[in-house]
Image (cartoon, rainbow, N blue to C red):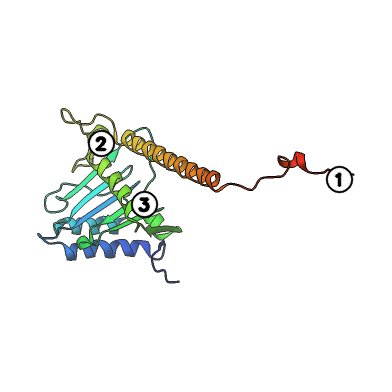
Amino acid sequence: RKFRKLLPSPTVFKQALLSKIDREIAQHSEGSPGLIQFKVNALEDKEITRALYRASQAGVKVDLIVRDTCRLRPGIPGLSETIRVVSVVGRFLEHGRIYYFRNGGNEEYFISSADCMSHKLQHRIEVAVPVEGPELREQLRQILEIQLTNRASLWAMQSDGTYVRSEPETGAETRGAQELMIERAQKRFQSTQQSSKQSHSGKTQGRTKGGSPSIPGGGFKGRKRRGV
């Protein structure tokens, strides 16, 4: 079966990722540098790892937010110099997946149920979907930027596979990425509640001004009761 936008596993998604990485390599230039950003639970698939190495060797910048297992090693001269791997440690065990490609300025965002793991890409039913709405894309961008730049909860992988905890710079934000995202979510919720109240209030005032049909006798009291 052919899909116009969905990228299901095990039939489509892995090959689509490989093709998009190769496209980023082909489009990369000094005037339009390539950028790949993944937020996943794990990066274990060999072919995806090799493709990301090829992207780095071509000069494409690769940012990886990987919560758990990561086969790739960043910062190795001649192999992965433009790759950065970080892990966010905080209150929650995150399971969100985001795949981003700059695509020569025609940006692509995907969310998915699948990590870059062979058994999920090749042996399980998973799906990735494009995110096209500007507001939703902006929310994904904020998530990526917060988790890549907030040093209060960031652990950076070294070229030998070990992790070093990042420390906030003097005067920088001391709250972790998840705390900042909780704050943003609360503000969105409060804003939605306020908008809902205003909308409800407007509808109520409209009914009052327009007048509602009255019930003779003050409602049910004015009606004659029928005998049983």
At label 3, the amino acid type is Asp
Element type where label 2 sits in the image? strand
How busy is the neighbourhood of tag 1: few (under 14 within 10 Å), some, or many (20 plus)?
A: few
At label 2, the amino acid type is Leu
- Kindly report which numbered mark, 1 or 2, lies closer to the viewer in this rendering: 1
Q: Is residue 196 above or below residue 4?
A: above
Q: How many marks?
A: 3
Taking depth in this image into account, of 15 and 104 the one nearest to the observer is 104
- Kindly report which numbered mark, 3 or 1, lies closer to the viewer in this rendering: 1
The residue that mark 3 highlights is: 115
| 217 to the left or right of 192 | right
The residue that mark 1 highlights is: 226
Identify the residue at the far bottom of this view.
1
Residue shown at the point (66%, 45%) measured from the top left = 214
Identify the residue at the far left of this view.
30
Q: Quadrant of the C terminus?
A: top right
* Percent x, y of residue 105: 21, 60
Q: Quadrant of the N terminus?
A: bottom left
Q: Which badge, 3 or 1, comes first in the chain's sequence?
A: 3
Q: Is residue 171 above or below residue 50?
A: above
- Kindly report which numbered mark, 2 or 3, lies closer to the viewer in this rendering: 2
Of the numbered discs in the image, which one, if any, rests on residue 154? Answer: 2
At label 1, the amino acid type is Arg
